Amino acid sequence: MKRVNLEIVGVGGQGILTSSQVIGDAALEKGLDVYMSEVHGMAQRGGVVVTTVKIGEKVYSPLIGKGEADIVLGFEPVETYRAIEQASEKTWVVTNTSPIVPFTVSVGDDEYPSVEEEIIPSLEKATDKLVTMNAETLAKEAGAAITQNIVLIGALTATDVLPMDREEMETSVEKNVPKRFVDINLKAFEKGYERTKELM
Amino acid sequence: MKELLEDDPGKEILLLGNEAIVRGALEAGIGHGSTYPGTPSSEIGNTFEKIAKDYGMYFEYSANEKVALETAAAAAASGVRAMVWMKHVGVNVASDPLMTLMYPGVRAGMVIVAAGDPSMHSSQNEQDTRFYSQLGTIPMLEPTTPQEAKEMVKYGFELSEELELPVLVRTTTRVNHARGVVTFDEIQEPDTDGHFEKDPGRFVAVPQNSMKNHPRLLERMEIAEEISEDSDFTYEASVEDPELHVISSGAGFTYIREAKEEHDLPISILKLGMTNPLPVEKISEFIKDAERLLIVEELEPFLEEKVKALAKEANPDVEIYGKGTGHFSRLYEYNPDRVKEALSDLIGFEYEEEPLEAEEYDLPPRPPSLCPGCPHRATYYAVKEALGDRDGVYSSDIGCYTLGIQDPLNAADFELCMGSSVGAAGGFSKNTDQQVFAFLGDSTFFHSGLDALVSGVYNQHDFVYVILDNRTTAMTGHQPHPGTGKTGMGDPAPMLSIEDIAEGAGVEFVETVEPYDIEETTEVFERAIEHDGISVVVPKHPCALIEQRKVDWSPYQVDQEECKQCHICTNKFGCIALVREGDVIKIDETLCVGCGQCAQVCPFDAIKQEEKE
């Protein structure tokens, strides 16, 4: 198989580490090699978080080059946009549309672009392979806003770019979230999955 | 992470580099572990914290890296396998005992893990720690992946015992914080049965002993060089008639290997795992027929300079590329693009996916910031209120509170390293007429805030020494410290009082205050500023990340009818849960933790807590 590269981007505290763990475990379970690069420490305090996940028969390095992502999974619209040079024509861009406004905007130092009028239209212009959803709304429908990350994992699975299928990914979700929240998370997964299939 | 204790050889598991390092130590039967937390090494301690007791070893969070290294050295001198780990700048703190420890060496194996941070993801500098191996004459291993990190730590103990010297395992962020598939070997029982056999001629570093021990060290390094020549961690992949020879070590190697394997490049690679002492013959043999040689290593030209020197004898005609030729930089970590760029210039390798072209926006930066509910924000706000229009110098330190540097608090003017706030504050107070503040946290106070306190009292420095006590080591992931009443193994411990220590050192003004009460805190700072000499103020409130998990709360809201849009809450206080849309201020309920600090700051009482349902 050809190596599959994921670039997962967002903001510290959005559950990105859990998401990459879900993907990595599923790949390992399928007998594939996995190499991931994570962000810990200072950046986690509300800063930009970028996680790379590479899956293949043998993976040698933790990072990817420009345009090399098969999927850019964005937990926050501006962060998706910031990571766009990791994507090329072949890349699926899956993004949450619910913004987290940096404090630099609130103190008046910077401006946050309009998601509906600027970010999304510009992404649409740049690529046909775009999936957008308000993961926060879908997560709340599933039962808890905190399951946004699993909504997006469902969306990612629905693109069929991963070598793992829906069942294999769901099994990994079950394994990686606290037991008492398994049902809510599986519902969140379904929300993201179904929404993506509708859009594709 | 109890899985790390499974004695299940052959098992494949996805591990963070730092967890793999722990597993390597368990497979070597580690008896003693000590550290002071620092990114990117922190998860090593976090992991031992969870498993040390079940495994049966001793583990401690020492007050700082120097103490951590000294305790480990004593363990190893007593026949107990010991590991000490720290971030790269932690080695600076530990370097004093380390430089001399190399003379007597150790009995049981001792491994020192030094985790570098190229690109400074969470660090104040990106110093290349490999040079310590030369400065101290220390055998060094450089892993490239989590799997190799595990193997090198395990082997490090054996090597250390063979040489009777501590062994340095030097990692970087892309090893410590990479997650990869790691294969378990057999786990060993912990080595805890220590007894110190006296040998003062060896272990007491007085001049006449060091005169004997230094040549002993050099002799042992000769043995180490022979070992380096046959190291299992050397990897060689040669092709016939290569267009380019490559020598590499560390995380940079992974990118060049990937390019070679996936695109079948006509290059021969020699990867070195043991990089001090270098395998001189191995390298000479590798380069003797080379026409062109590229050196791939992050940060300083550590290998490059040595290989250049070797080439003078082994192959004077070889053209050597790397930092000297501008193909690589001494700055920042490497990535696939930087390695491909060098290959493109040297062998015409072209592989690039065309990145998407998208309209350019001035995207707002997203620097890390103090969390909602963080008590430090209230402390900084109160200091600024108390100071008013007077000119203040804010001497800051290493920890979450350094994030006070951001708008609108702007509460960090000078900062170098752990503990530097206090000495520098003394220097500012003696050499300027500005009102000086030193800001450092509780864990940093115990790490290196004591010596400058004593020195400052003695030399009659005049500044406000603010110890922001959030009852934990927050930035690195909430480790306990001497003031928390808990050890690294989870046992109860004496809870050292910062206030008692300050009073014991002769400080006349020592006050503790609840920073969530901003008015009271401001009043304390007003008095502290008036006091001549060092005044110690301890704003004490647990880290918001710990507290918000426990407290029953409801979020605050802005009453838009009462709000006069003065923007004091955003422009002077600046909690990230306060969101400004045009002139309207709202509170993001998903971020608000209900601390109520902003309600105190609002002059119009427009910020109110929602009724609990």
Image: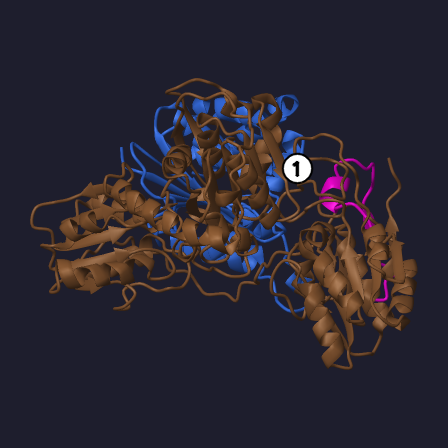
Q: Amino acid at mark 1?
A: Ala
Chain B display color: brown
- Estimate the x, y position of residue B540 in percent, counting from the top left: 82, 50
- Residue B410 in view, yes or no: no
Identify the residue at image location x=90%, y=72%.
B530
Q: Which chain is blue?
A: A
Nearer-the-camera pick, B299 or A67: B299
The stretch of residues the image draws in magenta is: B540-565
- Estimate the x, y position of residue B230 in percent, counting from the top left: 23, 39
Could you say whether the residue bearing mark 1 is in a helix, strand or loop? Answer: helix
- Mark 1 neighbour class, 10 Å CA radius: few under 14, some 14 to 19, many 20 or more: some
Q: How are the residues colored?
A: by chain
- Residue B447 in view, yes or no: yes
Nearer-the-camera pick, B250 or A31: B250
In this rendering, the answer to whether B64 lies above or below B417 is above
Identify the residue at image location x=32%, y=49%.
B275
Location of the C terminus of chain B (image quadrant): top right
